[in-house]
Image (cartoon, grey):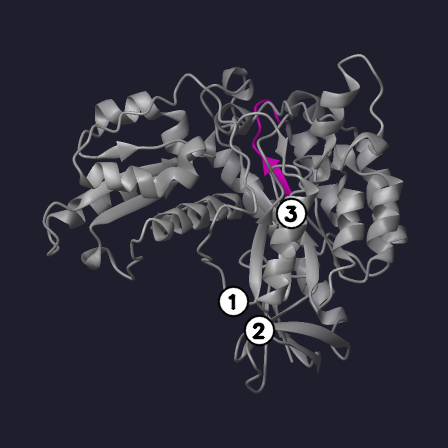
């Protein structure tokens, strides 16, 4: 399995591998030993699509060099879902393309491919409806002490730069019972970090309300599960662990959710809240469903309502029509807001998106310059925030004998703590921060 892209795609890879194990197959550690290769693709932005194509071609070329005659190649993931017809025409060397609804069926599909059956699923004209559940077996690809828990699939937001709803379909929440059963099982296995993910974690359960309330009736949180209710139930799970909220949309935060996080000891004081921009006209053109005033008010509420919270966000630079004045307002906002963690994306023009058809596309040279300016500013802020932690005692989760993370650091995307002496992997330790090294801390 070669899995590319985000953590949500990684969960799909774990489900696929669980399916092949269920069918009595083995997972190999190298392509040379495999009868079947699976490339789980990403198609979020151009660079991700290029990486996916390169991985497919590399896997195919490698088949001619290894010692497994008749080795099969299967392509899954967002690229397969979105470009099924085109890929089949352009890549006849691939034995099967499967869509998102087929992730839990990979074992059966592999058997058919090995039997040289024609596996010609058609995904191009339908949106997926699959929802992960606890009964689907998985093969974890993350460290034993950290796991991703996908609580919903799909997205209902109309962001003009994004095509995820076209690839992954409408938002579909798991039942609360399914999520809690999975989390109890993971904690019992020794997992110390549970990362809740979906395209919009704060939208969890709202699709179920809408089904019950009807299109013209007001939505009432008592009608179905909510993220608030889920966090309260997670708090009751016995064991030492923390829960991290990733991919929260600013439009769906409530005072009740902030109060709940503050009251729940097992919810990490860390909020991932992609904002994408701050200038009013940019937010409107991006169709972000929020205003600058809403964002500024929300940040103030988060910081006052959850003492010690670390905020992570992402912004897009070079969106069509972004003027110098609009970009400068973003820089000023970054300087004033002082986010603990911040990432910058250079706008990627996506076919099928509203923004892809907009006039005034920004030249690559301008995008690059704005990216450097924003990241340079954030680098200064990040170093200042890191320096403020020197001398403090912090609870750390050990990832490697000499590497750990704080509550303010999500796996793979945030900074690390370099330890002066080895500590047991997968355990919590309390250490005094003694210094900084680049973005990282020393302890």
Q: Residue at x 88, y 41 (%)?
A: 255
- Point out the tag, 1 or 3, that comes first from the N-terminus: 1
Total tally of numbered discs in the picture:
3
Would you name the residue on which mark 2 appears?
426
The answer to whether residue 321 is magenta is yes
The answer to whether residue 384 is magenta is no
Q: Identify the secondary structure beneath mark 2.
A: loop
Residue 368 in view: yes
Would you name the residue on which mark 3 appears?
179
- Image height check: is 86 above or below 186? above
Horizontal and vertical percent position of residue 433: 70, 78
Q: Quadrant of residue 159?
A: top right
- Image height check: is 396 above or below 9? below
Residue 53 in view: no
Q: Residue at x 73, y 66 (%)?
A: 238
The CA span between labels 1 and 3 is: 19 Å
Q: Are marks 2 and 1 in contact (CB under 8 Å)?
A: yes
Q: Which residues are magenta?
A: 313-322
On the rendered structure, is 27 left or right of 261? left
Q: Identify the secondary structure beneath mark 1.
A: loop
């Amino acid at each position: 399995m070669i899995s590319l892209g985000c953590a949500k795609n990684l969960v799909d890879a774990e489900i696929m591998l669980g399916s092949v194990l269920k069918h009595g197959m083995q997972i190999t550690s190298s392509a040379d030993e495999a009868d079947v290769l699976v490339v789980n693709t990403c198609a979020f932005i151009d660079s991700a699509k290029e990486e996916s194509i390169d991985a497919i071609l590399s896997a195919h070329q490698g088949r001619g060099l290894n010692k497994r005659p008749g080795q099969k190649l299967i392509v899954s993931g967002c690229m397969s879902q979105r470009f099924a017809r085109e890929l089949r025409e352009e890549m006849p060397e691939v034995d099967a393309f499967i869509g998102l609804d087929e992730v839990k069926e990979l074992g059966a599909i592999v058997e058919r491919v090995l039997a040289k059956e024609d596996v010609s699923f058609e995904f191009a004209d339908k949106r997926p409806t699959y929802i992960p559940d606890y009964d689907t077996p998985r093969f974890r690809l993350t460290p034993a002490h950290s796991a991703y828990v996908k609580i919903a699939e799909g997205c209902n937001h109309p962001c003009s730069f994004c095509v995820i709803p076209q690839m992954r379909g409408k938002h579909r929440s798991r039942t609360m019972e399914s999520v809690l059963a999975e989390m109890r099982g993971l904690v019992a296995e020794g997992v110390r970090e549970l990362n809740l993910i979906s395209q919009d974690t704060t939208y969890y359960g709202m699709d179920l309300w809408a089904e019950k309330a009807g299109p013209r009736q007001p939505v009432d949180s008592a009608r179905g599960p909510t993220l608030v209710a889920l966090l309260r139930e997670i708090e009751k799970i016995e064991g030492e662990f923390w829960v991290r909220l990733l991919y929260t949309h600013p439009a769906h935060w409530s005072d009740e959710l902030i109060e709940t996080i503050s009251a729940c000891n097992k919810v990490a004081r860390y909020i991932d809240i992609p904002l994408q921009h701050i200038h009013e006209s940019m937010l409107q053109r991006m169709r972000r469903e929020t205003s600058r005033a809403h964002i500024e008010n929300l940040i103030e509420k988060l910081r006052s309502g959850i003492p010690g919270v670390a905020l992570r966000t992402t912004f897009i630079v070079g969106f069509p029509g972004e003027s110098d004045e609009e970009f400068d307002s973003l820089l000023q906002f970054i300087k004033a807001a002082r986010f603990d963690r911040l990432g910058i994306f250079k706008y990627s023009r996506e076919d099928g998106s509203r923004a892809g058809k907009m006039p005034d596309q920004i030249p690559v040279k301008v995008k690059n310059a704005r990216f450097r300016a924003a990241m340079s500013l954030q680098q200064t802020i990040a170093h200042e925030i890191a320096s403020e932690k020197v001398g403090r005692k912090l609870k750390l989760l050990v990832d490697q004998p000499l590497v750990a993370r704080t509550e303010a650091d999500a796996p793979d995307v945030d900074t690390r703590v370099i330890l002066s002496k080895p500590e047991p992997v997968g355990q919590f330790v309390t250490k005094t921060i003694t210094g900084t090294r680049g973005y990282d801390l020393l302890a």
